[in-house]
Each structure stands twice: as structure tokens, then as C-alpha cells.
Amino acid sequence: MTADLVLLITIGALTACGVYLLLERVVSKMLLGMILLGNAVNLLILTMGGPDGKPPILSGSDTSTEGMADPLAQAMVLTAIVITMGLAAFVLALAYRSYMLTTTEDVTNDPEDTQVASRRELEDPEQ
């Protein structure tokens, strides 16, 4: 099986950009990174599904499965698209709520988490 090199480079670039954006401290950039990463995974699933082929629905007397496209990869991508859009809507709702409460989009360190981390360093300085 041969894979298209341009498509694989595109998948790599989308993955790299998605991971970079996920590591940012701004919610909108995290959302864009999540969407880019989801699209990269969808392209990877379609690439690994194999080459184009005949439709997977058989009609009439033609029951030969030779050259048929793999319907599992297409079904998985459609499911992943729905899940990604639902997750994007949830993150947008969280970002809107956070913006209404704090009037900023940046994710800051929680004071309680910082206090627990400093307490842990004082209890066991060897780690």
C-alpha cells in the first residue's frame, strides 16, 4: 500500500500546529488547536483506510467485494467530526462563561494549585 506523501506531510503539519496551539494559555487558541488536531486525525484515518474504490453498497447481482472502498474508515471519520463539533461547542460555552466572569480569555494559575505545589516542595525537597 502506498500513501500520498503530500497528504502525510499535511497531516504532520496539522498535528504540529494543533499541538502548538493546544499548549497556549488562551482558550480560543486551544480551541483552534483541538480542531486542527481533530482534522489531522480524520485525514490520518482516511489515509489508512486505503485507496479509493467502488461504493461499499452492493446492488443487483454484483456481489464481488474486490476493489470496494472500506466503509469503516468513513464511518469513523463521520463520528469523529460530530464528536469534535460537540467538544468545540462545549469549549466555546466554557470560554464564554469564563470571559463573562473574569473579562479575560487567558487561563491563569489557580492560587490553590500553586499553594499545594509549594507545600509539596516543602514536605519533600528531594523530588
Image: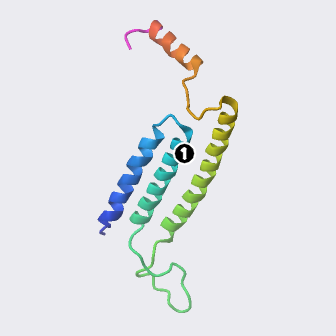
Quadrant of image for the C terminus: top left
Left or right: 93 as drawn, with respect to 109 = right
In the picture of the structure, the residue carrying the numbered disc 1 is 31
Q: Residue at x 53, y 92 (%)?
A: 61
**Is 90 in front, or is 57?**
90
Q: Badge 1: how crowded within 10 Å, few (<14), some, or many (20+)?
A: many
Q: Is residue 91 above or below residue 10?
A: above
Among the 4 quarters of the image, the one containing residue 111: top right
Left or right: 100 as drawn, with respect to 62 = right
**Is 53 in front, or is 24?**
24
Q: Does 1 appear in magenta? A: no
The range drawn in magenta is: 123-127
Q: Residue at x 41, y 53 (%)?
A: 14
Left or right: 7 as drawn, with respect to 39 = left
Q: Position of residue 59 (x, y in %)?
A: 56, 88
Task: Name the magenta segment's main secondary structure.
Answer: loop
